[in-house]
Structures are given as C-alpha cells and as structure tokens.
Amino acid sequence: MARNVVVIIGAGGMGQAIARRQGPGARVLVADFDGELLESVTGGLRGEGYEVTPAAVDVSSPDSVVALAERAASLGEVRAVVHTAGLSPVQAPVPAILAVDLLGVALVLEEFGKVVASGGAGVVIASMAGHFRPPVSDEDALRLATAPARELLSLPVAEASRFSAPGEAYSFAKYANLLRVRGASPVWGERGARVNSISPGVIATPMGQAELSGESGAGMRMMIDASNAKRVGAPADIAAAADFLLGPSSGFVSGTDLLVDGGVVAAVRTGRLG
C-alpha cells in the first residue's frame, strides 16, 4: 500500500508547526534552501518520531522545483503540499523577493499540480500584506493567475523596475499569490485535488520578529493593538488553519484565501487606526 506523502516547502517556524501536525503516519518531505536549517529541522523531527526525508530546493529555479516534485512522487501518494518558503522585505531586495515570493509560488503550484494525488490538497502561505495591495486591472489579474510560471516575471505588471522598495514588491507578490492559487484550482481539480492559500498576520517566527524590529515595526504594532486578538500570532495558529484546509472538512473549498491575522485587516479596513 502506498504511503501518504506530506510535502513541506520551507523549514521555518510555520513549516515545522505544520509538519508536526500533518506528519504522524505519513512520509514527510521537508525542503529548504538553507542546508544547515534543513539538517537541524530534519534531525529534530526524526527525534520526535516522524519519518522525514530532507531535500534541498531553490524555489526560484524551475529545474529545482521539478526535481522536488519528482522526488515527492517517488516516495508515495502526494496527499498534502504546503508552501511556506519566502523572503520578507528586511531580508532581500526587490528582484529576489519577486523571484522567490512570486515565481517560486507559481512554480510550486505548477509542478505539484502534475503529481498531487486524487483527494490531495495544497496550501500556499501568502500574507495579509496582499490584502492591502490595490487590485490590478482585470487583464493583468488574469495574466498573473494563468500565465505559465516561467513567463511570470516577464509580464509588464511584474517588472522589478515598477517597485520602489522591497515592501512594495512583497505586497504585490503576496497579492499575486492569491491570484495564482485561484488560477491553479481548476488545474488541480482535474486531478481530483484542491488548493487554497492562507494569509497570516504577524507571526512569532524569526522572519516575523525581524519585521517587527525593522522600519515597519511600529506600524505593525499599532495594527496588532487595534486588532481583535491584540497579539502576535503563533505558528500553531497557522498550522491549525492549514489542518482545516488540508483535511476533509474543507472538501468543498478550493481556490480561495483564508485570512489568519487576528483581525488586523478588519481593524485597518474599518478605520480603527484613525
């Protein structure tokens, strides 16, 4: 009997939390660009009793993502694919953010849409930042949703020169992630699988803490204070949301985004910040 395979792309705090929630009884393929982090996380999960296969991946490289999808399919039935890998505005310049956060997501959706098993599901970790981005035209939205992944960064709307700062590129990429998931849904549906996204708010991961310590930190704290939850999120909050989207309770849900931000976007959109 073929074993179920859970693919976790990105071995950071959210990826680890989701791996622990989805991993019991499955083969867990954990992939990351950072070799030292991958080795540490693999060792930790194995020590807790999980069956883990590590894999190096550069999500901005088509060949690397193709190889990862093939590796996952060789392990068994790919039942869950979770893409958490990304760069934040304090970590990288505009071209790198577009390559990883925009192209990388598109490549993963495209290649894993070819190997995901019937009944399987995927989750892309986007960001609440995408909900603050003004929408593009209908024509550009369709291109961002459906253009072949390898052509995505050649679209005029996605040219690096259009973005004056990493934060602007980041919010655009995360907005485009929601469109890519929408575009991927019918393709995954042809294999009997579903795909959705989660837009986290500020989460207590190393990346989230770096953003809180950066130039936008003061504004982020104001948004948190005005929110319903009035706290920073935990990786477990995202793992719980992913558990719903990957499981049978969401069998009628595909191509949509789940905002898991403690109510930050609602607070901003309704003027609670003045």
Image (spheres, helix red, strand yellow):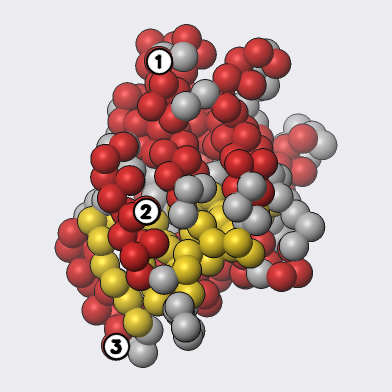
CA distance separating discs 2 and 3: 26 Å
**Dot 1 alpha-carbon crowd within 10 angstroms: few under 14, some 14 to 19, many 20 or more:** few
Q: Amino acid at mark 2?
A: Ala
User: Can residue 165 be seen?
Assistant: no
Would you name the residue on which mark 3 appears? 47
150 up-or-down from 91: above or below:
above
**Dot 3 alpha-carbon crowd within 10 angstroms: few under 14, some 14 to 19, many 20 or more:** few
Residue 261: x, y in percent? 65, 52
Residue 82: x, y in percent? 49, 58
Of the two numbered discs 1 and 2 on the same chain, state the one appearing first in sequence.
2
Locate residue 55: give its quadrant: bottom left
- Quick one: SS at disc 1? helix
Left/right placement of residue 112 relative to residue 227 reads left
| Residue depicted at x 48% and y 75% | 4
Mark toward the viewer: 1 or 2: 2
Mark toward the viewer: 2 or 3: 2
Would you name the residue on which mark 1 appears? 154
Left/right placement of residue 249 relative to residue 145 reads right
